[in-house]
Amino acid sequence: MTKKIVVLGSLNVDSIMKMPRMPLVGETMALTNVTTAPGGKGANQAVAAARQGADVSFIGAIGNDANGQFMRATLVNNGVNVDQLKTNGDVPTGSAFIMLQDDGANTILIHGGANQALTTADLDRDLIIDADLIIAQFEVPYAVILAAFELAHNHHVQTVLNPAPAVYELTPELMAVTDIILPNETEAQLLTGIEVVNDEGVLNRVTDALQAKGAKRSIITLGAAGSFVADGQRRWWAQPEKVVAQDTTAAGDTFIGTLASVIASDFNNLDDAVKRASIASAIAVTRPGAIPSIPTFDEVEAYS
């Protein structure tokens, strides 16, 4: 059965600046290339889920500008339902500036624009209630995320939270209605105050801290080191596929969208879902760009 997924999230037009390394303070450095591409964590996750065969609807906002029409067309062309995509004429469409180094590492600056102008009035109650799962990130207002997750939780819809960027607290109210939280290592460190390193003892401490905040299940993505998964009393370090990374921009979003598309209603296939998400993410980092790098269902099947 096709899984119905709602993504409550951000839409950004990405300006990707390639450079040998990050410049030092006061240094002037020549870029090796500059490109523009569709992005935003919400858009990336929606496309990732859709390319894995899910029935995906998007709740978000764009500006009344060319970038907004570009992002709307991107979602439509990738099979995402945009009936609940709002147009806000008072602010521009969100944008992101991605500094991509030769080793594939990236640093990202974001201007929220229309993403941050989203309100609880923009939520479609029936769309959320009818879904199997809803995903949200921290690139839209906290109040909107909380309202959507409370509605979903009350109607037995799975909730997946990507606390990125880590700009909001993991409040008891939000964690009570969150089924899975998916931070990367940087976000996990900011949310728990514990320096995250690739050590099982440290990752257990970070997981303990997330559970103390109310996390039922957590997956800490660790880039090339894989992910550290906690499901109730069971914890394990999921090892990644070994690839040569070209661009890590959409790796985490690909992981999340893929996981959401295959996770069982009772979460009992979390191990297999993480494995598939890891494969999809590994494929994505071997390609340039965000949305252009996200693999299809058949590509993940072939890799498997």
Image (cartoon, rainbow, N blue to C red):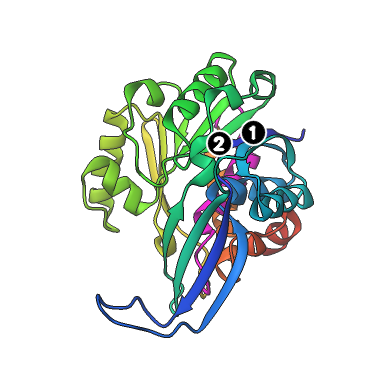
Q: Position of residue 13 (x, y in %)?
A: 58, 57
Q: Residue at x 58, y 44 (%)?
A: 259
Residue 37 vs residue 300, the one in the foreground:
37
- The quarter in which the N terminus is drawn is top right
Q: Position of residue 204 (x, y in %)?
A: 27, 44
The numbered disc on residue 135 is 2
Measured as percent of width and height from the top left, residue 40 is found at 55, 51
Residue that mark 1 sits on: 6
Q: Is residue 204 visible?
A: no
Horizontal side of 75 relative to 42 (left or right) equals right
Residue 257 magenta-highlighted: yes
Q: Secondary structure at mark 2?
A: strand
Query: How would you rate the neighbour count of disc 1 (Cα within 10 Å): few for under 14, some for 14-19, many for 20 or more?
Result: many
Question: What's drawn in magenta, residue-wise?
Answer: 245-267
Question: What quarter of the picture does the C terminus occupy?
Answer: bottom right
Q: Is residue 177 above or below residue 98?
A: above
Q: As rendered, which of 80 and 96 lies closer to the eye?
A: 96
Q: Are marks 1 and 2 in contact (CB under 8 Å)?
A: yes
